[in-house]
Amino acid sequence: MVEPPVTRGKFITLEGGEGTGKSTQAARLKDYLAAEGHNVIVTREPGGSHGAEEIRELLVSGATDRWSPLAETLLFYAARDDHLMKTIRPALNRGQWVICDRFADSTRAYQGAAGNIATDLLHTLEHGVIGADWPELTLIFDLDPEVGLARAGRRLGEVHAEDRFEKKGLAFHARLRQSFLDIAARAPERCVIVDASLDVDQVTHAVTTAVAARFPGAAA
Ligand code: TMP
């Protein structure tokens, strides 16, 4: 018997600065989509596959100046390539929906706008590694970085190994915020800004509303 063709899943990314509540909302969005009848995975960057999680350790721990901006960018893209090949594309091809906590917009914001890596290089890496597999929807969680960093600190406690980026100064995080807003303004067909200062249930409502609007026929 011939199996019916599988409809490719949808790819949704969550982006924003530190402490914006993306991970909580990723889990809630998964529950919402699962209740709609979809098969959903939540994954993250850097990480999301065995090799990429190994690279994550190199990226998120240690001194803030451990890597040059260029080396850091290449490590993020090495991890992203593995994640796309081993986790994201296979899941989409199986018909699963993929919710990813951070993706290429984080590289544009952290390494590009806030870290001064040239846009041309980022475009070349995006072309070679991501190709056509950009997310259909990107939710940009917008929050005053002072609030976000305080939240991240509270959540993570005083001893925290994965804080290379949180340790960068407030000016860096303010540039990041603006950079994410610029990304959203340049790609309005893909990006929706979510006000992450609202309470957690209101943010969930904003997220599910944006998803329902972007995928109107997608109720299973
Ligand atoms: P996380 O705390 O959201 O798991 O992300 C780990 C850190 O890595 C976070 O501070 C943001 C940073 N990051 C980049 O600088 N560039 C990237 O491309 C990604 C995916 C994350």
Image: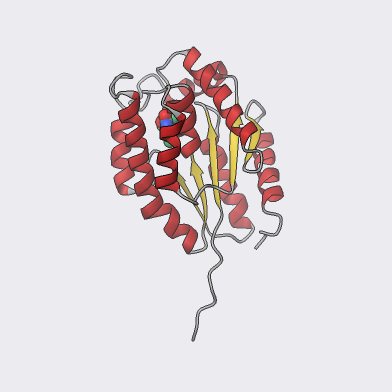
| Residue 55 visible to an observer of this rendering | yes
- Compared across the picture, whether 214 is left or right of 180 comes to right
* Picture quadrant of residue 44: top left
Measuring 68% from the left and 43% from the top, which residue is drawn there? 210
Image region (quadrant) for ligand 1: top left
Residue 193 placed where, x, y %?
65, 33
In the picture shown, does residue 203 fall above or below 218?
above
Measuring 36% from the left and 32% from the top, which residue is drawn there? 73
Measuring 51% from the left and 37% from the top, which residue is drawn there? 23
Residue nearest the viewer, comparing 125 with 150:
125
Q: Quadrant location of the C terminus?
A: bottom right
| Residue 102 visible to an observer of this rendering | no
Residue nearest the viewer, comparing 180 with 220:
180
Marks counted in the figure total: 0
Residue 67 placed where, x, y %?
29, 24
Residue 155 placed where, x, y %?
47, 26
* Picture quadrant of residue 64: top left
Check the image and tell me how it is coloured. Answer: secondary structure
- Compared across the picture, whether 41 is left or right of 46 comes to right
In the picture shown, does residue 168 fall above or below 79?
above
Measuring 47% from the left and 62% from the top, which residue is drawn there? 93
Residue 87 placed where, x, y %?
40, 53
Residue nearest the viewer, comparing 108 with 158:
108
